[in-house]
Amino acid sequence: MSDDRKKVLIVDDNPVNLKMARNALISAFDVFTVPSVAKMRQLLESILPDLILLDVLMPEIGGYEAIAELKADERTNGIPVIFLTSKADAISELEGLSLGAVDYIIKPFTPQLLLKRAKIHMLIESQKRELKYINANLEKLVEAKMREIVELQGAILSTVSELVERRDDVTGMHVIRTAQTLRVLTEEMFRIGVYLDELRQWDIELFLQSSQLHDVGKISIHDDILMKPGKLTREEFDEMKKHAAFGEKIIDRIQQNTRESAFLTHAKIMAGTHHEKWDGSGYPYSFAGEDIPLQGRLMAIADVYDALISERPYKKAFTMDEAGRIIHDSFGSHFDPALEEAFEAAFARFPCPA
Ligand SMILES: [Fe+2]
Ligand SMILES: [Fe+2]
């Protein structure tokens, strides 16, 4: 017997039938024969056949009961079963097939035909297995490619945001803390059920990642202004304000050179609208209320919170509680009042000052 020969198990209480079936198949397969379902159970403990030929009418346990048992067991439910029976009526045949048999062969059978049909079912099975294997490999390949892209995107992203942030944020923690703030805020929004329809359309991880680019427009701001150790003059502040629209423009340019991506869409919206205010007094567009995209309304809270708890050359760092109170008092003027409940619930998990 060679190892790659497929194994067929025949279960039949009639020794003549067993022998005939065995003789029909022995040229192509390793054949095991047992006279009862009880013996089949025993044999299955040591051998897993590739095909089972099962008699229907047997004393004690019949074929229908046996197939139910085979299909219920994880170890054997993948083995194709062919009923081999003298019950020649269509109803029996239908019943046998609906129990999960792949074929129904009426006795007495023609040996060549039995062999042919056994071979066909073996072929179908091996093709099924091959397909499963190919699918699993394809999935793995796609997964690996996806991971590669996400890693690459992450690496480019953190480099770019670091380049931008390092100029006015020595620790580089601003983007990390704002992303963390957005994470707990959106978690509470899901829990409470605020803006659920919109949130469900987002890939939250992509949204959080893209938030790192919200100040990318600062690369256009001159060092003298960006790193000025004191309060900005009115003109300087007007110059500084340009970073929002400029960031939007930069991401828009990237978008034109690449395919549609939710990541860039979030990033562009956040860059362009994170300084808008609910009452319309923000910049650059003076949008008001829900005309400000939700991404911008959320980023506004995270950005202001982080600015408040951070020390600047011209201001001390507020404590978490002070910052919380200032934001609390600004719902309805600076921030979307519908986000207040989520803010209050999430606040305890906001990142601490550096
Ligand atoms: Fe900004
Ligand atoms: Fe910022």
Image (cartoon, rainbow, N blue to C red):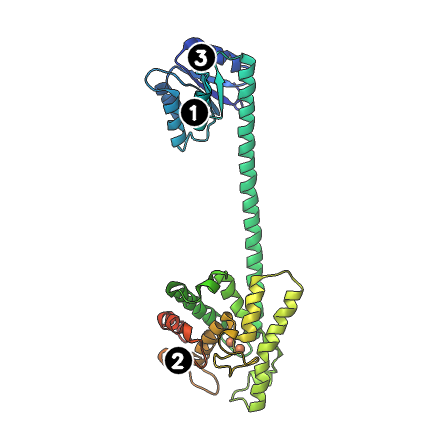
- Quick one: 40 or 86, which is closer to the camera? 86
SS of the residue under disc 2: helix
Inspect the image, locate mark 1, and give the three-letter code of the amino acid beneath it. Glu
Mark 2 vs 3, N-terminal side: 3
Other-residue count near label 3 (Cα within 10 Å), few / some / many at <14 / 14–19 / ≥20: many
Tell me the distance, in whole angstroms, between the alpha carbons under discs 1 and 2. 73 Å
Mark 2, residue position: 323
Q: Position of residue 139 (x, y in %)?
A: 54, 45
- Mark 2 vs mark 3, foreground winner is 3
Label 3 sits on residue: 18
Q: Amino acid at mark 2?
A: Ala
Q: Secondary structure at mark 3?
A: helix
Q: Position of residue 66 (x, y in %)?
A: 38, 24
Q: Is residue 330 above or below residue 89?
A: below
x, y (%) of residue 22?
A: 48, 13
Which residue is pictured at 37% across the width and 27% down the height? 69
